Image (cartoon, helix red, strand yellow):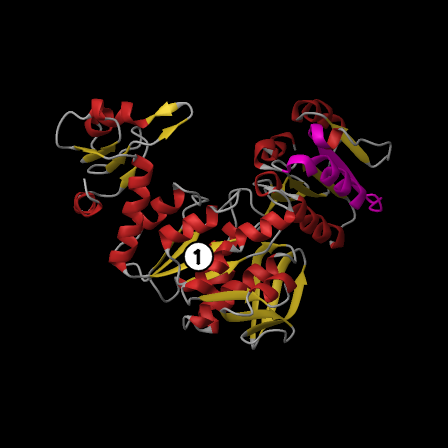
Amino acid sequence: MEIKEIYNNFLQTTGIATDNRKINTDNLFVALKGDNFNGNKFALSALENGAKFAIIDESEYKIDDRFILVKDSLTALQQLANYHRNQLKIIIIGLTGSNGKTTTKELINAVLSQKLNTKATIGNLNNHIGVPLTLLSFDSSTEIGIVEMGANHQKEIEMLCGICQPDFGYITNFGKAHLEGFGGTEGVIKGKSELYEYLSSHHKTVFVNSDDAIQNKKTTNINRITFGINNTANFVNITKIETNPMLKIEFEDTTIQSHLIGLYNANNINAAITIGKHFGITNDKIKFGLENYIPNNNRSQLLEKDTNKIILDAYNANPSSMNAALTNFFQLEEKYKVAILGDMFELGIESSDEHKKLIEFCFNQEDINFHFIGKDFFAHKNSNTNMNFYETFETFQSAFPNQKIENSFLLIKGSRGMSLERTLDLL
């Protein structure tokens, strides 16, 4: 079936579903496949649960005209999303980077939605499936779509750009994330810069942090709008930054008291300010949007539990984000501080060295009690009296009742697979 015909069927539905257990009435079900599942087997169930049509790619499951048979369901989903994007003809902002993508996306959305009908990637649906689903959630009332693009190997951002065709782009940073898939730090820079290559070849515009030397160099021949700190940029400049521990910034005649933790979030806020101003959002509305954004989902959340204050940043971790979080934590003027840190994943052959470097980064912080959790940290355990090492979360859990952590400021950070938010139940 031609993509135009599939699109006409899509227009008769209430949206896309890929899980037959989560069907809304008149959805279009797309039968995707994975290593351990075959969505074709659940297409009939999806229709029985209320779906209007089902896209399948195995002919044996086609029973009647409600089943749309294609060569490959995933490819059909991606083509459908691209076709929809071109029918809507809306402005798309593409966003990627090693750290801070989701937070920055939410900040941009918080600002732009003060004036424009804006939709953004939900959660972190930012891969080869999530990006099409995001695009297909936009409709004729959408004025600007913010599409987060994640990647862990070369050519992935290129492929996602081909689907969403961004008009504007922003890369948060180049950090030590997914080193295994990208093949090292240079591979990360090359892979993320595929967004720049797309925007340059299509004569589009990038937003650039002028304080980032690598990004400055890579965007000299692209139409760009820059922001920075203390008059380094041509558009928006933050003139003052404070953390106590919430981040407060000043630009032009405006002061913004955010709910975000850490100096590293200053650039994320500045990107949102810059993009907002470019699209005509006034300073007072930018202030309102940013001050009313409250982080969740274990991302830089400031919590209080009994007598303790907690920075919960357990959604993900890599050497760059861990270093930034610790640098901020070290600067906080608190009497009793505890850092609970979990292993960083997907670092490949550099994993051992990066975990060792992070431990060494903490050596001179004798006033902080460190708890390193996971086999990669455990492999570099030492005898420092303020450093504790646990090979698993379970061993940490067993030892935790003896810690008696009270009236302290805690940082909890680790890769998603470590699930360090479980620590909250121990406090």
Identify the residue position indicated by label 1 in the image: 94
Which structural element holds mark 1?
Answer: strand
Residue at the image position 61 percent from the left and 32 percent from the top:
418
Structural crowding at the residue carrying mark 1, measured as other residues with C-alpha within 10 Å and reported as few (<14), some (14–19) or many (≥20)? many
Residue at the image position 47 percent from the left and 46 percent from the top:
156
Q: Is residue 334 magenta?
A: no
* Vertical position of residue 10 compared to residue 424: above or below: below
Q: Nearer the viewer, residue 354 or 302?
A: 354
- Residue 23 location in percent, x, y? 27, 33
Task: Look at label 1 and name its amino acid.
Answer: Gly
Residue at the image position 41 percent from the left and 53 percent from the top:
161
Which residue extends farthest left?
65
Q: Is residue 110 left or right of residue 191?
A: left
- Residue 205 location in percent, x, y? 45, 67
Residue at the image position 69 percent from the left and 42 percent from the top:
410
- Residue 49 location in percent, x, y? 22, 28
Q: How many marks?
A: 1
Question: Based on the displayed image, in which of its 4 quarters is residue 27 positioned?
Answer: top left
- Residue 287 in view: no
Looking at the rendered image, the quarter that the C terminus falls into is top right
- Residue 122 location in percent, x, y? 41, 46
Question: Based on the displayed image, in which of its 4 quarters is residue 55 positioned?
Answer: top left
* Vertical position of residue 225 compared to residue 395: above or below: below
- Residue 197 in view: yes
* Vertical position of residue 58 compared to residue 335: above or below: above
Looking at the rendered image, the quarter that the N terminus falls into is top left
Q: Is residue 136 left or right of residue 388?
A: left
Q: Is residue 368 magenta?
A: yes
* Vertical position of residue 235 compared to residue 3: above or below: below
Q: What is the magenta range?
A: 347-376
